[in-house]
Amino acid sequence: MNITQTNPKRRKYGVAALVGLIGGIISAIIKFGWEVPLPPRTPERNATNPPQSLLELFGMNPDLTHATYTFNGNEGLPWMSFIIHFSFSIVVAIVYCVLAERFPQVKLWQGAVFGILVWIGFHVILMPLMGIVPAPWDQPWQEHFSEIFGHIVWMWVIEVFRRDLRNRFTKEPDAEFALETH
């Protein structure tokens, strides 16, 4: 298999990391919004969400993982889950944006394929193996539906931010496209 790489002189890794940070924050908010009309977990499984389960697996006290705050009269907002949610989104977005600088095929289907691979890697393989979520065949189809399409939309938003902000910051097209010379 031939893996296309960009010209090293055209790569902007610092800009990629910055736009990954921005895209990661915005896409985390989008993923939250996606899960309002299409909640991935049943009410019974929502009592302890995957970020809380992960932290507890690593030995964190459940009192801390389930700690909440109140904002604008809304009680029960799980701040530790939000930190993990945003951190995961930011890290994945930075990795994606940096990889996209060197390997343009990472952007296949405007990031949708990368999003599907993240879903498979974490929700179908890793988290079930760690016991954080049930085995894929024991999860309701609605969970798979919400998560796969949620990951596609999430990564597409990262790609939109990556492409737009990279081009705005550098005043150049993506690294794989040749600059026009006059």
Image (cartoon, helix red, strand yellow):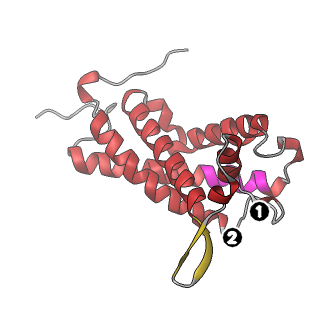
Does 95 sit above or below residue 37?
A: above
**Region of the chain picked out in magenta, as a range:** 143-151
Indicate whether residue 68 is drawn in magenta.
Answer: no
Does 61 sit above or below residue 109?
A: below
Q: Please name whichever residue, 178 or 40, is drawn nearer the observer in this view of the structure.
A: 40
Q: Please name whichever residue, 7 or 145, is drawn nearer the observer in this view of the structure.
A: 145
Question: Marks 2 and 1: CB-CB under 8 Å?
Answer: no
Q: Main secondary structure of the magenta part?
A: helix
Residue at x-position 43% and y-position 21%: 4
Q: Quadrant for residue 99, please give it.
A: top left
Q: Quadrant for residue 175, please give it.
A: top left
Amino acid type, label 2: Pro
Residue at x-position 45% and y-position 59%: 26
Residue 33 position in % (x across, y down): 58, 67
Residue 133 position in % (x across, y down): 78, 46
| Quadrant of the drawing holding the N terminus | top right
Instruction: Identify the mark nearer the N-term, 2 or 1.
Output: 2
Q: Which residue of the protein is positioned furthest toward the right in this rendering?
A: 138
Q: Provide the secondary structure element on which disc 2 rests.
A: loop
Residue 171 position in % (x across, y down): 20, 46
Residue ID for mark 1: 47
Residue at x-position 50% and y-position 41%: 92
Residue at x-position 62% and y-position 57%: 64
Would you call the spot at circle 1 few (<14 residues within 10 Å), some (14-19), or many (20 or more)?
few
Would you call the spot at circle 2 few (<14 residues within 10 Å), some (14-19), or many (20 or more)?
few
| Quadrant of the drawing holding the C terminus | top left
Q: CA distance from mark 2 to mark 1?
A: 18 Å
Is 20 displayed left or right of 37 in the figure? left
Kindly identify which numbered label has been placed on residue 37.
Answer: 2
Does 154 sit above or below residue 1?
A: below
